Image (cartoon, rainbow, N blue to C red):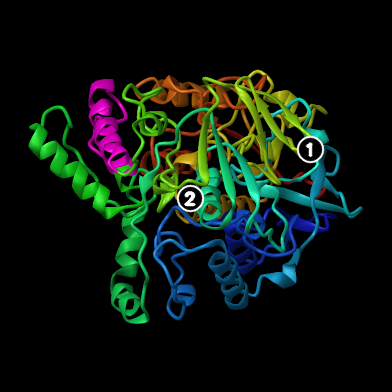
Amino acid sequence: MPPSNADFDVIVVGAGFAGVYQLHRLRSLGFKTLLLEAGSGLGGIWHFNRYPGARCDSNVPVYEFSDEELWRDWYWDERFPESGAMRRYFEHVDEKWQLSRDIRFDTRVSSATWDEESLQWCIESTSGSSLTARFVVVCTGFASKPYTPDFEGLASFDGVCHHTALWPQDGLDMTGKRVGIVGTGASGVQVVQEAAKIAAEVYVFQRTPITALAMQQRKLSRADQDEMKHDYPDMFQRRTKSFGGFDFRGRTESALELSAEARNAGFEEMWQEGGFSFWASNFADVMLDEEANRTAYDFWRSKVIERIGDPQTAEMLAPTEPLHPFGVKRPSLEQTYYDSFNQDNVTLVDLRATPIERITGNGLKTSDGDYEFDILVMATGFDAVTGGLTAIDIRGSKGQSLKENWADGVKTHLGLSSAGFPNLIYLYGPQSPSGFCNGPTCAEQQGGWVVQLLADLRDRGVTRIEATPEAEEAWSTQVRTISEFTLFDKADSWYVGANIPGKKRELLNYPGGIPMYMQQCDSCAENEYSGFELRPMASDGS
């Protein structure tokens, strides 16, 4: 980098896939780099996800780095690893890449302020440390700020209450307990599956039924993986060419143009493949056309209701008439979720019919009655995509915070940077593929582009880069235009910020897919980083 009195060339925030990739690559190119991590270990959400049943919903080896140094001697036990296996994987990554020596753990960034005179960021943490850096790359992910609704009486609950994202690091035994679970998103589904096995009573409070897909979990032997590894390089290349960064076979056929027999055969093939195949590699028109979408929903429903004994419960979990199109709220993966509701110790409560009135000292009261339990699980999601960024008091060149800047809607160029915030880059963030993309793929594709950007700026002697307002407007227009062709606006989901009171309703992720997104980034670079204002080092070396 050009001469600077900053402590570091680059400070990276967050030690998930994106953050550790940045540290590894930037350090290898000679950048003086430091990573700050709020947790006591690597992994991002996989460090914090300790709730019962926490497990990946992307399968391996797709859900790992493509570096052969990492995968050659690494073996998994299952196709969809549990959270403990993910923590062991990050320990393996740390050992191979020697990351920890340049990471400060237990360091949560509280603020970052741009100093126009010195052309650097001043970073403060809750632990009291103060640091400066020429560039800041924020990798907080799309699910780092837990959200708990403002339920009346929540503070009065006398039992044990935890949000799934803030679960005790040493766990919590639910054996023989009465457990109330509010929320049926991904973490809610996973907790239900585990609680149903051991708890005395499980009350599941559902507002909107989840469209959970068959995980099709299976054990993986070393022999299986040794054989699979012959295809790893090609597989990692294929995932960069798919919409969501997975290794699914793309389908170009229209669901409506096929016969019912051929369409259902295709649906069945995707279903048996498991994971997100039924969502991420469905027929070309399923996420674009409501009639086509309905065929997918009806097939999904047929798979669910055949597993549930009570017709009324089946209708609550998989309504005949969908509340929203299939796939426009993020699906979850399940193994025994639907079977759990056949057990006598599991009760489903429909919050649309009987809303929560308040939390009580010993449970929860709905409009229909009282429920008592010992443990209250808040599986209530996140202030997604933007929340991790706005939780930090980031103040740009005009003193305005990033939260204030986005109060009327997100404004970015390429989902990477915002006008008024020089030398600040965020990965896996708003208006990038993030929530629609496999994390490791995005970490390497989007993250690799950022590494090259920083290297190019160093070579050119550039000390300051900032998105232009015109580029922000053009990118926001592109996100809106593509989204208008999809069905994502047909549901109140975290994809559009609708789960957070007062948050502007807008599609928060780039809906064009990884190949189209990277094409846009590469075009920007080829055109002298169009949409960014670059300022070279001044004659005095500043």
**Rendered position, 48 above or below 478:** below
In magenta segment, residue 90: no
Q: Where on the picture, by quarter, is residue 100?
A: bottom right
| Side of 225 relative to 129 (left or right) | left
Seen from this angle, which residue lies furthest front? Answer: 344
Q: Position of residue 319 (x, y in %)?
A: 36, 27
Q: Which label is found at residue 106? A: none
Q: In front here: 310 or 491?
A: 310
Number of residue marks: 2
For the residues labelled 2 and 1, say whether their Cβ atoms are less than 8 Å apart: no
Local crowd at mark 2 within 10 Å, few (<14), some, or many (≥20)?
many
**Rendered position, 497 above or below 430:** above
**Rendered position, 222 above or below 178:** below
| Side of 266 relative to 448 (left or right) | left
Q: In front here: 2 or 12?
A: 12
- The answer to whether any part of residue 363 appears in the image is yes
What is the CA distance from the residue labelled 2 to the residue labelled 1? 41 Å
In magenta segment, residue 300: yes
Q: Which residue is mark 2?
A: 442
Q: In front here: 55 or 339?
A: 339
Q: Which residue is mark 1?
A: 157
| Side of 242 relative to 151 (left or right) | left
Is label 2 in a helix, a strand or a loop? helix
- The answer to whether any part of residue 395 appears in the image is no
Q: Amino acid at mark 1?
A: Phe
Local crowd at mark 1 within 10 Å, few (<14), some, or many (≥20)?
some
Q: Residue at x 71, y 46 (%)?
A: 374
Q: Where on the picture, by quarter, is residue 103?
A: bottom right
Question: Which range is magenta?
Answer: 279-306
Specify which label sits upstream in the sequence, 2 or 1: 1
Quadrant of the snapshot with the N terminus: bottom right
